[in-house]
């Protein structure tokens, strides 16, 4: 499937900003389930300070705001050919070893609820089936509801309140999988929806490593493994390591954000 993506993020401030720096992970890479045909990133109101590949193999760009700016826009667009691989990404690569993906972070640190959820999972010798069962169990425990959690909500908090979004589902999955001694990571990317082109935000899911198969994706929110409607962009131990855009702004300016995202065939 050939997907066309256009993603614009626009920040505006109520007064000139003396200094600001944005860190972006918005460049997808080719892998077993996708081939990048074209991809561009345009910046208005700022400039690229440097770019590098992080420990996960993500392309990271540091974008500095022009002094005195009150607006900055970051627009990425391109065409991606995707393949149906049943969520299989393939062998491990990157600078971080597999054991690194068993490490908990503040966002994925398990409490008593996640520990109980993991302990209650049947010991199925078919690890892929067990991971699908874990995904379904989490989806039943955390209802999909927007505007009830935020980027700082932990996996344990989301499980406690029983509602959240794709980020919360992914955090809970990787937290529980690590308790089962399975390397797991957070994925940010795009999903072409069947009923709309214009979207409010990008998507997130999880991946787990299975011996002799490699990394496999699990979208808890939709209780499936990613198919050709998905585009992987960045991975990390949690949202903080795979966030599309994060940054800091000096001064007391109030910030407003407008996102425009289209994903279509």
Image (spheres, rainbow, N blue to C red):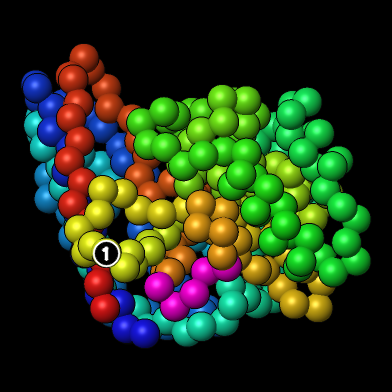
Between residue 82 and residue 119, name the one nearer to us: 119
Residue 211 appearing in the image? yes
Residue depicted at x 51% and y 33%: 163
Q: Is residue 68 above or below residue 188?
A: above
Between residue 21 and residue 222, name the one nearer to us: 222
* Magenta residues, dominant SS class: loop
Q: Quadrant of the C terminus?
A: bottom left
Kindly identify which residue carries mark 1: 195
Q: Is residue 227 magenta?
A: yes
Residue depicted at x 42% and y 81%: 82
Q: Is residue 250 magenta?
A: no
Q: Quadrant of residue 179?
A: top right
Q: Is residue 194 above or below residue 188?
A: below
Give x and y (percent) for residue 259. 21, 46
159 left or right, relative to 147: right
Give x and y (percent) for residue 177. 75, 50
Give x and y (percent) for residue 216. 65, 68
Q: Point out the residue furthest to the top here.
A: 252
Q: Is residue 33 above or below residue 97?
A: below
Tell me which segment is drawn in magenta: 225-229
Between residue 163 and residue 85, name the one nearer to us: 163
Q: How many marks?
A: 1
Residue 67 appearing in the image? no
Q: Quadrant of the N terminus?
A: bottom left
Q: Is residue 43 above or below residue 241?
A: below
Q: Point out the residue furthest to the front here.
A: 140
Residue depicted at x 80% and y 42%: 118
Residue depicted at x 33% and y 64%: 193
Give x and y (percent) for residue 54. 53, 55
């Amino acid at each position: 499937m050939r997907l066309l993506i256009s993603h614009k993020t626009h920040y505006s401030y109520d007064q000139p900003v003396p200094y600001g720096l944005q860190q972006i992970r918005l460049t997808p890479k080719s892998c077993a389930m996708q081939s990048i045909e074209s991809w561009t990133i345009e910046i208005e109101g700022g400039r690229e300070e440097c770019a590098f590949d992080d420990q996960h193999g993500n392309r990271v760009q540091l974008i500095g705001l022009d002094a005195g700016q009150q607006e900055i826009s970051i627009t990425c667009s391109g065409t991606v050919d995707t393949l149906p691989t049943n969520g299989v990404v393939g062998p491990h690569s990157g600078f971080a070893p597999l054991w690194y993906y068993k490490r908990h972070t503040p966002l994925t640190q398990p409490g008593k609820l996640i520990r109980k959820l993991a302990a209650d999972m049947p010991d199925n010798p078919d690890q892929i089936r067990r991971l699908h069962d874990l995904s379904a169990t989490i989806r039943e425990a955390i209802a999909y509801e927007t505007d009830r959690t935020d980027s700082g909500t932990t996996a344990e908090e989301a499980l406690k309140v029983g509602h959240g979004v794709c980020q919360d589902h992914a955090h809970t999955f990787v937290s529980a999988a690590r308790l089962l001694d399975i390397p797991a990571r957070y994925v940010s990317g795009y999903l072409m929806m069947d009923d709309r082109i214009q979207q409010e935000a990008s998507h997130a899911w999880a991946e787990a490593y299975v011996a002799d198969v490699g990394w496999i994706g699990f979208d808890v929110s939709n209780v499936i493994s990613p198919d050709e409607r998905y585009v992987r962009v960045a991975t990390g131990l949690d949202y903080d390591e795979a966030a599309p855009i994060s940054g800091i702004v000096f001064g007391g300016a109030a910030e407003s954000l407008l996102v425009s995202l289209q994903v279509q065939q």
